[in-house]
Structure formats: structure tokens, C-alpha cells
């Protein structure tokens, strides 16, 4: 089977987010486990600065000619309706490019790309030549349109992407929760949605914290006492304002002992806004630390050094930071919404995200009870073992092989055998 994978999810701004990390990790493992199958990776020439790095990253698993590059006729940004004709032309060009590669199955790593930038994605099409699978991360704008689709341009663009998504033959969801949303909100059949789950990078693991390491935390980020860690983002669903209020309501003896550390690129760039929210919630400036964007090695260090990781988001496709923190052996508490309960796997580590008192109570319970905290740490290490890229890659391959077989059966069943040649 020849599998052609659209890798733009690893090229756009998504490469700095969970989507890019997911794309890299899953496809690498699929390449390692490909057996007799052939893989071709499709890249967008408009993101020229990413191409050589991707070639290098996959050099161990794929031959050089397995990476193919296509051109777009820009501008194609989805936020500007004036670009619609060029974007449609570029979609036709991409479809023709896929067709030229003679795929048996096409896999789209990230369909919801291109509101800004140069990404062009398609799903379905090719006149039945090859079936298409799409990795489904979430349907957050569809589930919460009153928050995410108020802008007319975003609404128009997103609905167009949904129409592409509906033409996919199967969806590979990253959690049971996100897959259920496709069934409930887009009327996909349960058989057409396969949960392949997710995992985290192997570089997230428990480490020994030396005095030099602790000194590094102080000099680099100003972290000089125990801290609660949260992965921040500017998205409203991340519920940082709720976290600020909950932290401000902690008992005084706990607040005096801990800092609240927010890691994240977007939050750092809107630092003044979030600092204002925190102060309004009752926090002191000295209690809050913004790290900005950090490398994975630094993030691993922060996970290991924290006393507690809190994830208060009220909606996630998966919630990768929860798994990363557990893999590092840390106590984790999270909201009892969307995919987070299936990732965390422990009822007494959950809280209602819109209930500030419940969040405060759960943080205080962990920080004030060493036995409970240690129990959560042990649980996290065991729970994290249930997730691996090998498992996800095997699930993906099985789904794609079944899709290919079904496609061959359908073509065979519909093939016309004339009694004489016209």
C-alpha cells in the first residue's frame, strides 16, 4: 500500500503547538513500523524554511525521494474572501499533485490550516482514486460557535473546512472524546471514527533535580521556591482567569509557600493582559511567573521541578500537557470535562472547571497532603504507560489498511465488465 501523507501540520504555525508535535511523532513511528508499505510525505514549498529540517528528521526512516514538495498559487489566506479563487485553484493543484503520486490512501495530518499563511488542504476528491483519512484533533469551534465563530470570516472559513472534513472516508481521532464529537455533531458513523489516541515525546521523563538545576530555574525564570505549574494559552477555554481566582483563594499558608508558573508562548506575549486578570483576581505580582516559550528539555525540567501541575481547561481534544506531566511522575489535577478524564484516569484528581471553589479545594488537598500528592505521582507514572506512539501508530496502520481493503472491494464490486469493447 502506498500511503501519501500531507505533512503541512508540521510546517505551519501548528509546528509550535501540539498538532505539530503530534504529526511528527505519529508519522515517525508509522514510518518505523511501515513494513512492506510505502510512505510519501507531501510538503508545502511556501514553508521553505521547514523542509530541510523535516528531511533530516525523517532521514533515518525514509529515503530522500519519499519527501515531495508542491507549490501553491498565493495568496491563499482564508481570512480574506478576496483570496477564495486562488485558494480553490491551489486546492485543485494540490489534488492534481496527490493524483500524480498514485496513492492508495491519503492521510491529512491537519485539515484546519490556512486561515492565515500559505497552507492549502483538501479532503476527499480525486474522483474515487484513493480514499482519504483525516487526523481529528478536536471540533472546538463547532461545539462552541458562540465563542469561536463570531467573526464572519472565521465562520465562513471554518464551515468550508467542515465541508472538506465531511468528505473524508474515515477520521483518526486523538481521543474517544473528540471522536464522539464527530459522531454527535457531524453525523459520522461510529465505524468511520477510529480512536488512535496519542502519546508524548520520550524526552519527557523523571529526572534528578540537582542544586545546579534549581539554580538554573532561579536565574532563568526567577523560580526560587516551590511552584504550581500550568500550561498557559490565550484561548478562553484554557480557563486561566478561573485558575487565577482559584489560586488566590488558597489558604494563606499555602499561597505564602508557592508561586504560580505559566509556561506558554502566547500568554507571555499578552503578559500584561493576563497579569491584569491575575491582579484583579487577588494575586500579587510576585506570585506569578511567566516563562514564555520553552524548549522541550526546559519543559521537562519544569514538569519535574513543580509540586503540582494544574490543567483547568474546560475543553480539550486530548490534553497532552496532562500526559507529559504524569510521564514525569508529577501530581496532576485537571478539569472533569471533554477528554481529560480519559487521559488522567482518576476521579479524585478532577474538578469542575467553572467551579473556582472546587479547583481551590483540589489544589489545597494536593499541596496540603503529602500522602495524597505522592499517591497521585505514583498513579501518573502508571497511567502514562497506557499511552505510546507505537500503540497509536499500530492503530493508525490498521485503520488505513482496512480503509484500503474496503476501497478495493468497492471498486471491484462496481467495476463494469462489458461483453464487447465499445
Image: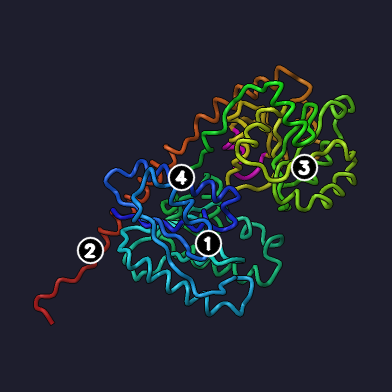
Q: Quadrant of residue 5?
A: bottom left
Q: Which residue is mark 2?
A: 413
* Few, some or many residues within 10 Å of mark 2 (<14, 14–19, 20+): few
Whole-number angstrom distance, CA of label 3 to CA of label 2: 60 Å
Q: Earlier in the sequence, mark 1 or mark 2?
A: 1
Residue drawn at x 90%, y 38% as measured from the top left: 284
Q: Along the line of sight, which residue is nearer the eye, 416 or 327?
A: 327
**On-image quarter of the C terminus:** bottom left
Q: Which residue is mark 1?
A: 47
| Position of residue 244 measured from the top left corner of the image (x, y, whole percent) | 82, 41
Q: Is residue 339 magenta?
A: yes
Label 1 element class: helix
Residue depth check, mark 3 versus mark 4: number of the one nearer the observer: 3
User: From what the image shows, is residue 359 above or below residue 254?
Assistant: below
The reply, left or right, for residue 204 in relation to residue 357 is left
Residue drawn at x 61%, y 42% as measured from the top left: 319
Q: Which residue is mark 3?
A: 290
Q: Which residue is mark 4?
A: 26
Range drawn in magenta: 336-344
Q: Earlier in the sequence, mark 4 or mark 2?
A: 4
Report the residue that reaches farthest toward the bottom: 422
Q: Earlier in the sequence, mark 3 or mark 2?
A: 3
Q: Are marks 1 and 4 in contact (CB under 8 Å)?
A: no
Q: Are marks 3 and 2 in contact (CB under 8 Å)?
A: no
Whole-number angstrom distance, CA of label 1 to CA of label 2: 42 Å
Q: Is residue 162 magenta?
A: no
Amino acid at each position: 500500500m502506498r500511503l501519501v501523507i500531507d505533512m503541512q501540520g508540521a510546517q505551519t504555525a501548528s509546528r509550535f503547538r501540539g498538532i505539530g508535535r503530534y504529526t511528527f511523532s505519529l508519522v515517525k513511528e508509522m514510518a518505523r513500523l511501515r513494513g512492506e508499505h510505502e510512505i510519501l510525505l507531501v510538503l508545502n514549498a511556501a514553508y521553505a524554511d521547514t523542509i530541510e529540517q523535516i528531511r533530516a528528521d525523517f532521514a533515518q526512516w525514509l529515503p530522500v525521494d519519499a519527501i515531495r514538495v508542491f507549490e501553491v498559487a498565493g495568496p491563499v489566506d482564508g481570512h480574506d474572501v478576496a483570496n477564495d479563487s486562488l485558494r480553490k485553484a491551489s486546492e485543485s493543484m494540490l489534488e492534481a499533485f496527490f493524483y500524480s503520486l498514485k496513492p492508495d490512501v491519503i492521510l491529512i495530518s491537519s485539515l484546519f490550516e490556512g486561515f492565515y499563511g500559505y497552507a492549502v488542504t483538501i479532503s476527499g476528491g480525486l474522483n474515487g482514486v484513493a480514499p482519504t483519512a483525516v487526523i481529528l484533533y478536536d471540533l472546538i469551534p463547532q461545539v462552541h460557535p458562540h465563542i469561536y465563530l463570531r467573526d464572519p470570516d472565521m465562520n465562513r472559513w471554518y464551515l468550508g473546512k467542515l465541508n472538506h472534513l465531511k468528505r473524508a472516508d474515515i477520521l483518526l481521532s486523538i481521543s474517544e472524546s473528540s471522536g464522539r464529537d464527530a459522531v454527535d455533531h457531524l453525523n459520522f458513523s461510529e465505524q468511520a471514527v477510529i480512536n488512535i489516541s496519542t502519546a508524548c515525546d520520550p524526552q519527557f521523563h523523571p529526572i534528578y533535580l540537582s542544586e545546579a538545576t534549581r539554580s538554573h530555574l532561579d536565574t532563568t525564570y526567577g523560580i526560587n521556591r516551590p511552584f504550581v505549574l500550568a500550561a498557559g494559552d490565550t484561548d478562553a477555554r484554557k480557563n486561566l482567569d478561573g485558575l487565577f481566582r482559584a489560586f488566590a483563594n488558597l489558604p494563606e499558608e499555602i499561597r505564602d509557600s508557592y508561586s504560580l508558573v505559566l509556561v506558554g508562548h502566547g500568554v507571555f506575549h499578552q503578559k500584561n493582559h493576563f497579569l491584569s486578570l491575575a491582579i484583579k483576581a487577588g494575586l500579587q505580582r510576585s506570585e506569578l511567573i511567566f516563562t514564555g516559550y520553552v524548549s522541550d528539555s526546559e519543559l521537562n525540567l519544569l514538569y519535574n521541578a513543580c509540586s503540582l501541575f494544574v490543567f483547568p481547561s474546560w475543553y480539550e481534544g486530548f490534553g497532552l500537557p496532562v500526559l507529559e506531566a504524569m510521564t514525569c511522575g508529577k501530581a496532576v489535577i485537571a478539569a472533569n470535562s471533554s477528554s481529560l478524564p480519559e487521559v488522567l484516569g482518576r476521579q479524585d484528581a478532577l474538578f469542575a472547571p467553572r467551579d473556582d471553589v472546587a479547583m481551590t479545594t483540589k489544589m489545597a488537598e494536593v499541596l496540603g497532603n503529602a500522602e495524597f500528592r505522592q499517591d497521585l505521582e505514583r498513579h501518573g507514572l502508571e497511567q502514562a504507560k497506557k499511552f505510546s506512539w507505537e500503540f497509536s501508530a499500530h492503530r493508525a496502520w490498521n485503520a488505513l489498511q482496512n480503509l484500503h481493503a474496503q476501497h478495493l472491494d468497492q471498486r471491484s464490486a462496481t467495476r463494469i465488465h462489458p461483453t464487447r469493447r465499445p
